[in-house]
Amino acid sequence: MTETKVERPIILVTNDDGITAPGIHSLVNAVKDLGDVVVVAPDKPQSGMGHAITIGVPLRLNKVKDFFEGAEAWQTNGTPVDCVKLAVDKILHRKPDICLSGINHGANHSINVIYSGTMSAAMEASIESIPSIGFSLLDYSIDADFSAAEFYVHKIVQSVMKMNLDKHFLLNVNIPAVPLDLMNGIKVCKQAYAKYDEDFDERLDPHGRKYYWLTGEFKNFDTGEDTDVWALEHNYVSVVPVHFDLTNYKLKKDLEQNWDIL
């Protein structure tokens, strides 16, 4: 009797902080025992790129050897979304079982999900019918401690991969920057209505020409205890289910029923 060979799951890993960022190395370390990990990441930081794609310049794709222990790795001059597109079309022999993006250096809760290259990469995978998760740690420093994040990444991914997932499954996971013994667990949340009160700091360069630095103060307008911001403030790992369908179904129904020009 011939024994059927079971394929190990393929885990696609990407990020927006670049292939050298400590966060992506922690992500690989957290999940490398769960499947065959393939990394496709930008060759430089791409934070705040949102869902940008490269259309005006050629894309380069280079294999990186001995960069990640237990993972095949590639780098590209493209955006996080380009990374997912290139992985699916040019590198993998089949669609990965799951796409993981991160671990981002800094928060991607509330309105940040709109601007985040980390979450846009995960969302692109979801659009491509690949279940995906974006992970972020609330610490922007290059020497951030990812040990507690690794624990929760492994716990979440291991659990998710046992589920019967919808092909558009997509989670936004944010992790407080506190030691593991201060974590209160995992909380499934909604996205808070919170945003930055922005300003552009106007300065002069040595030639007397104006230039601007974007600044801002984060403000939370959502006082509910079911939001990602509340969860993170109380040392919970926040898990927000998200999707790429931006249809406002309530407004759609109201217009269909009440708009006098229809």
Image (spheres, grey):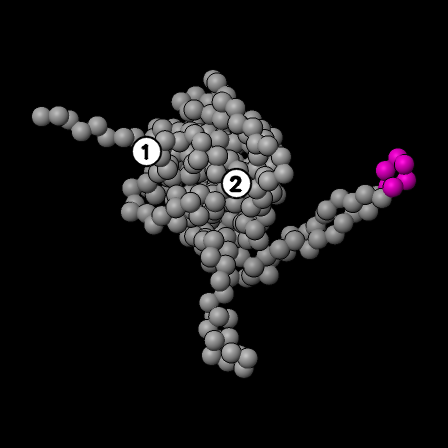
Residue 206 place in picture, x, y as percent: 88, 35
Residues marked 2 and 1 touching at CB (< 8 Å): no
Q: Residue furthest right?
A: 208
Please name the residue shown 70% across and 50% down the image: 216
Q: Can residue 51 be spotted in the picture?
A: yes
Q: Residues within 10 Å of mark 2 (few under 14, many from 20)?
A: many
In the image, residue 44 sits, relative to residue 230, either above or below, namely above
Q: Can residue 184 be spotted in the picture?
A: no
**How many marks are shown on the rendered structure?**
2
Residue 239 place in picture, x, y as percent: 44, 49
Residue 177 colored magenta? no
Name the residue nearer the viewer: 65 or 178: 65
Q: Amino acid at mark 1?
A: Pro
Residue 45 place in picture, x, y as percent: 61, 33
Region in magenta:
204-209
In the image, residue 249 sits, relative to residue 48, either above or below, namely below
Q: Amino acid at mark 2?
A: Val
Task: Tell me the tag on residue 81.
Answer: 2
Q: CA distance from mark 2 to mark 1?
A: 22 Å
Q: Helix, strand or loop at disc 1?
A: loop
Please name the residue shown 32% across and 47% down the image: 165
State the quadrant of the N terminus. top left
The residue beneath circle 1 is 9
